[in-house]
Image (cartoon, rainbow, N blue to C red):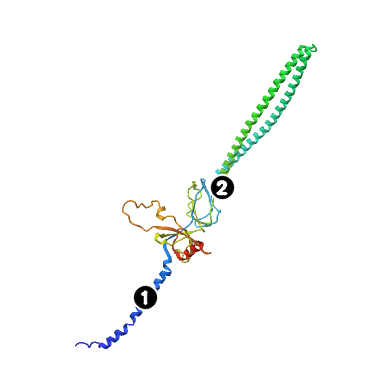
Amino acid sequence: MSSPSTPAPVAARRERAGLPWMPLALGAVALVLAVAGGYWFFVLRFIQTTDDAYVGGNVTVMAPRVSGFVAEILVQDNQRVRANQVLMRLDPRDYDAKLAQADAELASARAAVAELEAQRTLQAAVIGQHQAEVRASDAELTRSAQDQTRYRALVKDDAVSNQLVERADADYAKAQASVARSGASVVAAQRQLDVLAAQIANAQARVGTAEANRRLAALNVEYTTIRAPVDGYIGNRTARVGMLANVGAPLFTVVPAADLWVDANFKEDQLKKMHAGDHADVMLDAASTTLHGTVESLAPATGATFSVLPPENATGNFTKIVQRVPVRIRVKVPQGMEGVLRPGLSATVTVHLRDGGQTAAAVD
């Protein structure tokens, strides 16, 4: 026996009762789509985001400029250091000895210059003496010439003997020889003075060389003390007391505590409206706080261009790959959060193009 079917009027009433919910559902969907579209139109289309971003900084690898055995290490791994703080000392005894040797050589070179200067002063006095002898010889020559003239006039009158005339001639010849000898002595003394001047110049050059060697030796002594170049933290310390540190061998790394940035690698199609000055938000994976910053610059080429083996698309089959361009973000670190940024940390960067466009327009 079959059960009685539902009366038709009752089913019709139920169908009419369910119809009003359909417009409400369609309206809700339309509202959601409108809100989503408006949010995209007014917000999302002015935002570019990438999680291919990393914190960067000028990490300094500390290496000695002179070789030597490590005598003292004054820092530990992860320790905070200040600029110009002493980090390590090498054994300076060899370089101290070389500095003392350079000081002795410099003193010897300066003494040689002083000795030559004294000789030049003495030679100037010798030249003065020879010049006085020249004047005396000239006076004697004048007197001898006058005696010769007088005796020759007297001998004609038989007032004097020929012997006196011959003596006067001899005195005159002797006076001429004395004048010539005195003049030659002056010339020789002046040439000796020129020789001394050249020797002094050479000695002064040796002083300059000795001074340069002394400065180099002093620098080598100073290089045995290794100091921090900037405020930061010590990392990757490989130095040990007693080990031989060679020139250029890395001993530890100084990670800067400030002046850090974020390099965000955006796809090339995300850069259409991105400019320097755009505002950016940086979310570090290692922190829950959003940091604010500014686009400082865009790289002049893609990251692949700067790689060790840049791509070569002129041969073989070509597969287009979207390239990425490094964008540097200068982050404003709030007070008390200086230790949040560390080179190498991953981050998610969001750049607000609309704010940057207004800023760029204001700058222009």
Image coordinates of residue 220 in percent, x first then y, are 55, 45
Q: Residue at x 66, y 27 (%)?
A: 187
With respect to residue 354, does 213 lie above or below?
above
Residue 352 visible:
no
Image coordinates of residue 76 in percent, x first then y, are 51, 55
Mark 1 residue type: Ala
Depth order, front residue of 146/241 = 146
Q: Quadrant of the N terminus?
A: bottom left
Instruction: Quadrant for residue 267, please give it.
Output: bottom left
Q: Specify whether 262 is left or right of 133.
A: left
Q: Specify whether 86 is left or right of 190.
A: left
Mark 2 residue type: Glu
Question: Where residue 129 is drawn, which disc sits there?
Answer: none
With respect to residue 241, does 54 lie above or below?
below
With respect to residue 102, does 328 lie above or below?
below
Which residue in the protein does label 2 denote? 222
Instruction: Quadrant for residue 199, please give it.
Output: top right
Q: Residue at x 76, y 21 (%)?
A: 143
Badge 1 local density, few (<14 within 10 Å), some, or many (20+)? Answer: few
SS category of the residue bearing label 1:
helix
Image coordinates of residue 258 in percent, x first then y, are 52, 59
Which residue in the protein does label 1 denote? 30
Depth order, front residue of 239/330 = 330
Image coordinates of residue 97 in percent, x first then y, are 57, 42
